[in-house]
Image (cartoon, rainbow, N blue to C red):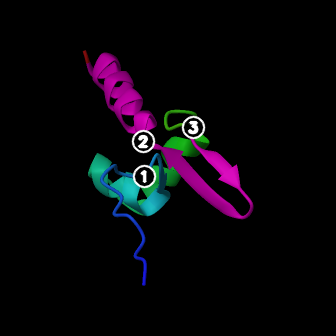
Amino acid sequence: MTTAPLISEPPHLLRVEDAARLLGVGRSTAYDLIAGGLLRSVKIGRRRLVPREAITETIDRLEQEAA
């Protein structure tokens, strides 16, 4: 019997709910950030996903706006 290898890297694409949790905001706020162009996302089929690096980009952008 073979077992699937364990994935040690985090996923490159996150569900909006997971991206919201990492940003410390609610799901609705995450969708507002996406709609406002502040949080980059991609649509694959019916799913809206957020690239992991988009989290850092959004934090950097919001910090610049606050300064």
Depth check, mark 3 against mark 2: the one in front is 2
Which amino acid, mark 3? Gly
Please report the bounds of the magenta region as a residue range. Answer: 41-66
Q: Which mark is residue 52?
A: 2
Residues at marks 3 and 2 touching, judged by CB atoms closer than 8 Å: no
Q: Mark 1 packing: few (<14 Cα in 10 Å), some, or many (20+)?
A: few
How far separated are the C-alphas under marks 3 and 2? 18 Å
Q: Earlier in the sequence, mark 1 or mark 3?
A: 1
Q: Position of residue 38 (x, y in %)?
A: 50, 33
Q: Which residue is mark 1?
A: 11
Residues at marks 2 and 1 touching, judged by CB atoms closer than 8 Å: yes
Which amino acid, mark 1? Pro
How far separated are the C-alphas under marks 2 and 1? 8 Å
Q: Which residue is mark 3?
A: 36
Residues at marks 1 and 3 touching, judged by CB atoms closer than 8 Å: no
Which amino acid, mark 2? Arg
Q: Quadrant of residue 60?
A: top left
Q: Position of residue 36 (x, y in %)?
A: 57, 37
